[in-house]
Amino acid sequence: MSKAARLREKTARERIAAQRAAARRQEQRRRMMLFGGSILAVIAIVVGFVVYYNLRSPASSTAAGGVHGTVLPASTADKITDVPAATLNQIGGGSVLSYQTPNTATSWSGFEGSPPIIKANASLLTSGGKPEMLYIGAEFCPYCAATRWSMAVALSRFGHFTTPLRGFHSSSTDVDPSTPTLTFYQAKYQSKYLTFTPVENEDVNRDPLQATTSAQQALWVKYDTTTSDGETGQGYPFIDFGNKAFLKYPIFDPAILKGLTWAQVATDLHDPSSTVAQAVDGAANYFTAAICKMTGNQPGSVCSASSIKHLESSV
């Protein structure tokens, strides 16, 4: 790698690290303000919701059923959920490792030398009698926006979404504004190998959307508590692969998706030479390897692929 390329890579990593540290600090301040609210304000909000839900019409109840985003055309959704195994195998780790691992000595707010996926060896996390993959993110978050594409590609190798995939955009006022993405809010997924539990913790306006359970919160605090610039907290996205591996850092730069439509991203996933495929599919392969680790390498048709076996040794 040339010196110029290394410098560009270093600059990108430092930019992402600084942005995420700022987002973490902002999120900590927001949570402190929420918890510091008066009891009377909480009661007022609760009463307001009760009155609203009691008075609204059946039609508005259906419309307010929590549907976010735009249902993607079948042609676009199919490209996301059916990236050929040959394409994924050709890409392997893609451009993920070069983004995650610095080639020069540098300090970038906790990212330095971090692997794409962090290994763990805790007791298997399960739900419904199957290994559980827990995702905690937020709709405003550009790093979650990037990560969801890879999650959708990887999860589709082990099962299928039983609700339509919905296109979405991250916040227009955050870093990497309006990054094209999906939303997993109220998404349903079915697999004989694992349980996928998505929690979109906040909406695009940073308002509360889906609360974590006490058990989910405990895992998030335990495995994703980081101190940055003197402030401690949890960040988005967080993925717990059955307590066998974790993702708690951005796995690739959301700027890669800038200005693209959902259809363009979906199409690029099938072109191994594209920047999008190298990032999204590369991350999807890391996620696939982490899922294989928690499912005991099932199914063999997925987990025995040479690219996945190679990556599994690193997660």
Image (cartoon, rainbow, N blue to C red):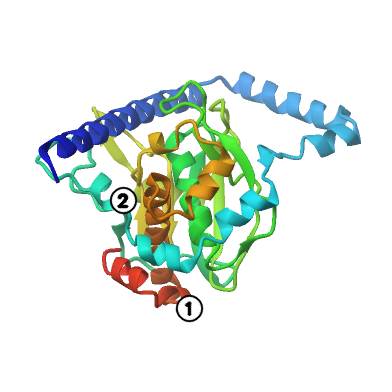
Looking at the image, which residue is at 45% across and 32% down?
A: 258
Any part of residue 244 in sight? no
Any part of residue 115 in sight? yes
Residues tagged 1 and 2 counted as in contact (Cβ below 8 A): no
Q: Residues within 10 Å of mark 2 (few under 14, many from 20)?
A: many
Asked whether 241 or 121 is in front, the reply is 241
106 shown above or below 245: above
Residue 7 image position (x, y, % from top left): 16, 34
Residue 38 image position (x, y, % from top left): 56, 19
Tag count: 2
Residue type (three-letter) at the residue carrying disc 1: Ser
Q: Quadrant of the C terminus?
A: bottom left
- Tag 2 residue: 96
Tell me the number on the disc at residue 264.
Answer: none
264 shown above or below 296: above
Residue type (three-letter) at the residue carrying disc 2: Val
Distance of label 1 from label 2 (alpha carbons): 24 Å
Classify mark 1: helix, strand or loop: helix
Q: Is residue 176 left or right of residue 204?
A: left
216 shown above or below 107: below
Which one is earlier in the sequence, the residue at label 1 or at label 2?
Answer: 2
Residue 103 image position (x, y, % from top left): 14, 45
Tell me the number on the disc at residue 301.
Answer: 1
Residue furthest out toward the bottom: 300
